[in-house]
Image (cartoon, rainbow, N blue to C red):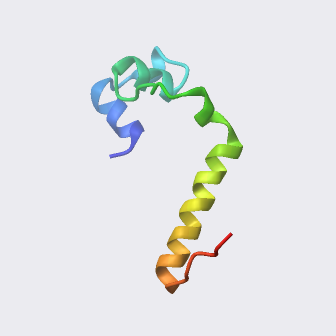
């Protein structure tokens, strides 16, 4: 079920009261904000985690040994 379908099932004429689908979903409690540490918002750290996961997946797939420093 999509977000729009979920909102419309709870409030069929949501467009009359809300300017956007996300405002309606937030008020209905379908979506909620999550508290996270400010450091997780830095793109450099988020990309570092993604890169690390990609390297681990590559090594697992191809049985590659870890490089020694």
Residue 45 vertical placement versus 56 (above, below) = above
**Residue at point 62% right, 32% down?**
39
The quarter in which the C terminus is drawn is: bottom right
Q: Nearer the viewer, residue 68 or 34?
A: 68
**Residue at point 33% right, 36% down?**
6
Total labels: the figure holds 0
Q: Nearer the viewer, residue 63 or 50?
A: 63
**Residue 47 location in percent, x, y?**
65, 51
Image quarter for residue 43?
Answer: top right
Is 51 displayed left or right of 24 in the figure? right
Is 9 displayed left or right of 34 in the figure? left
Residue 12 vertical placement versus 16 (above, below) = below
**Residue 4 location in percent, x, y?**
41, 37
Residue 6 vertical placement versus 44 (above, below) = above
**Residue at point 34% right, 22% down?**
29
Residue 62 vertical placement versus 12 (above, below) = below
**Residue furthest left in the image:** 10
């Amino acid at each position: 079920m999509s977000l729009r379908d979920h909102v419309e099932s709870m409030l069929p004429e949501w467009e009359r009261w809300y300017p956007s689908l996300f405002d309606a979903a937030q008020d209905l409690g379908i979506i909620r904000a999550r508290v996270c540490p400010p450091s997780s918002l830095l793109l450099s750290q988020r990309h570092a985690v993604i890169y690390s996961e990609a390297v681990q997946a590559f090594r697992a797939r191809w049985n590659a040994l870890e490089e020694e420093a």
